[in-house]
C-alpha cells in the first residue's frame, strides 16, 4: 500500500526543489541564500545543483511545474514574494495534480490497484468516488459478517439464494450497486458467501432496490429472504411497515404502486415460475443485515 503523500515526498518534492534551486542559482543567488529561501541545507542545494538527486522526468517536463518554478524563482529572488506565498502556490499546484492528473497517474503507476477506479478523484477528498465506493464495499462486508454469524440465518435463505446489496447515493443502474457474485447460499445449514462483494454483481435484488428508490424511498440497501406469512408477521411485530407487490407485473411499476418512503419491507407471494420472496430495506447493508439477524431470533423462538 503506497500513499499519494509518499509520491509527493519521494518524487515531486525532490524534483521540484531541485528545479527551484536551479532557477534561483540561475538568478545569481548564492547557495546560502537559496538554502534560506527553500528552508533546506546548503549541502542539499549543492546536491540539487550538481544533479545528485534522482528526478522524475514527467514532473520535469510538465509545463505547469515549469511555469510555477519560473514564477516562484523570480518572485523569491526579487523579494516580491514571501516564502509563505510560495508555499501556498506550490500546495495549490500539488492538490491540482493529485486530482486525476500527473500525481494521480504517478500514484496509480506505483499502486496499480487504483486503476480499477474510473474518473478523476483526489484520494484524500471526503467526497471522492474512491472513498464512497470503498465505504459501500466495507458496509456490505460488515453486513455479510453479521449474516454469517447470525445463528439460524441459513433457514431464511430462499432456494434461489439471498443477496445483500447496497447502492451509491445517486445510483441509476445495477452497476452502481454492490452485491455478492453468485449470491449467499445455504450450504449444509450454514450461510455461505462464495466470493467478495463487487459492483454490478446482482440483477434482480439490485433492480428491486433501484425500483424502491424511484418511489422516493431513501433505502440504500436490500436483503432478500424466503417468504412465509409467519415471517411477514414477525417483521411487522418488529415495527416494520410491509407492502405486497405483484411479481408478475413490470417490476418498477409493481413496486411503484405499493411502495413509498415509509415502507421497510416488500414481499411477493410468488407466481408462475417465480419463487415468493421478502425484501428487507435499510439505510445501509450492515443495518439491513442486523434486521435479518433479529428476525432469526423471532423465527427460532
Image (cartoon, rainbow, N blue to C red):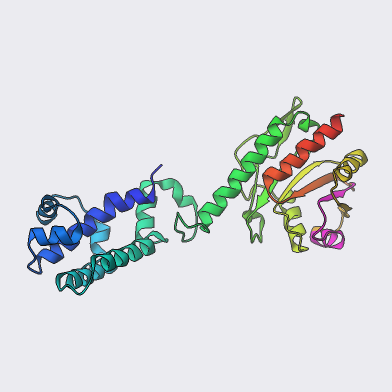
In this rendering, the answer to whether 4 lies above or below 83 is above
The answer to whether residue 289 is left or right of residue 5 is: right
Residue at the (77%, 39%) spot, across then down: 292
Query: Residue 170 sits in which quadrant?
Result: bottom right
The image shows residue 287, relative to residue 8, as above or below, that is above
Q: Is residue 245 magenta?
A: no
Q: Is residue 159 left or right of residue 133?
A: right
- 253 magenta-colored: yes
Magenta residues span 252-269
**Quarter-of-image position of residue 92:** bottom left
The C terminus: image quadrant:
top right
Q: Position of residue 115 (x, y in %)?
A: 45, 51
Is there any visible trace of residue 158 in the rendered image? no
* Left or right of 117 in this view: 180: right
Residue nearest the viewer, comparing 26 with 106: 26
Q: Residue furthest top?
A: 188
Picture quarter with the N terminus: top left
Q: Is residue 62 above or below residue 241?
A: below
Place of residue 156 in the rendered image (x, y in percent of width and height, measured from the top left): 81, 35
Q: Looking at the image, which residue is at 45% across and 46% down?
A: 113
Q: Position of residue 107 (x, y in %)?
A: 37, 51
Of 262 and 75, the residue lying toward us: 75
**Horizontal arrangement in the rendering, residue 203 relative to residue 81 (left or right):** right
Residue 195 location in percent, x, y?
61, 36
Residue plotted at (87% across, 59% down): 258
Is any atom of residue 109 visible in this view? yes
Amino acid at each position: 500500500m503506497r500513499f499519494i503523500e509518499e509520491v509527493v515526498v519521494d518524487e515531486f518534492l525532490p524534483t521540484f526543489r531541485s528545479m527551484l534551486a536551479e532557477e534561483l542559482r540561475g538568478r545569481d543567488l548564492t547557495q546560502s541564500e537559496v538554502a534560506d529561501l527553500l528552508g533546506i541545507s546548503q549541502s542539499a542545494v549543492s546536491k540539487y545543483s550538481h544533479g545528485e538527486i534522482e528526478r522524475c522526468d514527467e514532473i520535469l517536463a510538465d509545463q505547469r511545474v515549469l511555469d510555477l518554478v519560473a514564477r516562484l524563482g523570480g518572485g523569491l529572488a526579487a523579494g516580491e514574494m514571501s516564502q509563505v506565498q510560495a508555499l501556498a502556490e506550490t500546495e495549490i499546484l500539488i492538490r491540482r495534480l493529485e486530482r486525476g492528473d500527473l500525481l494521480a497517474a504517478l500514484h496509480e503507476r506505483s499502486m496499480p490497484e487504483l486503476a480499477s477506479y474510473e474518473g478523476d478523484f483526489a484520494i484524500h477528498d471526503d467526497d471522492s468516488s474512491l472513498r464512497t465506493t470503498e465505504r459501500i464495499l466495507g458496509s456490505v462486508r460488515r453486513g455479510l459478517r453479521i449474516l454469517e454469524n447470525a445463528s439460524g440465518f441459513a433457514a431464511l435463505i430462499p432456494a434461489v439464494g439471498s443477496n445483500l446489496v447496497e447502492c451509491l447515493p445517486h445510483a441509476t443502474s445495477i452497476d452502481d450497486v454492490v452485491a455478492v457474485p453468485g449470491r449467499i447460499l445455504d450450504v449444509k445449514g450454514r450461510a455461505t458467501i462464495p466470493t467478495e462483494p463487487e459492483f454490478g454483481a446482482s440483477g434482480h435484488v439490485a433492480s428491486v432496490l433501484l425500483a424502491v428508490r424511484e418511489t422516493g424511498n431513501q433505502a440504500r440497501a436490500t436483503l432478500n429472504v424466503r417468504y412465509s406469512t409467519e415471517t411477514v408477521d414477525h417483521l411487522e411485530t418488529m415495527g416494520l411497515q410491509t407492502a405486497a407487490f405483484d411479481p408478475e407485473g413490470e417490476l418498477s411499476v409493481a413496486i411503484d404502486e405499493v411502495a413509498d418512503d415509509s415502507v421497510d419491507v416488500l414481499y411477493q407471494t410468488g407466481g408462475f415460475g417465480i419463487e415468493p420472496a421478502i425484501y428487507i430495506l435499510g439505510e445501509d447493508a450492515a443495518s439491513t443485515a442486523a434486521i435479518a439477524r433479529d428476525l432469526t431470533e423471532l423465527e427460532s423462538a
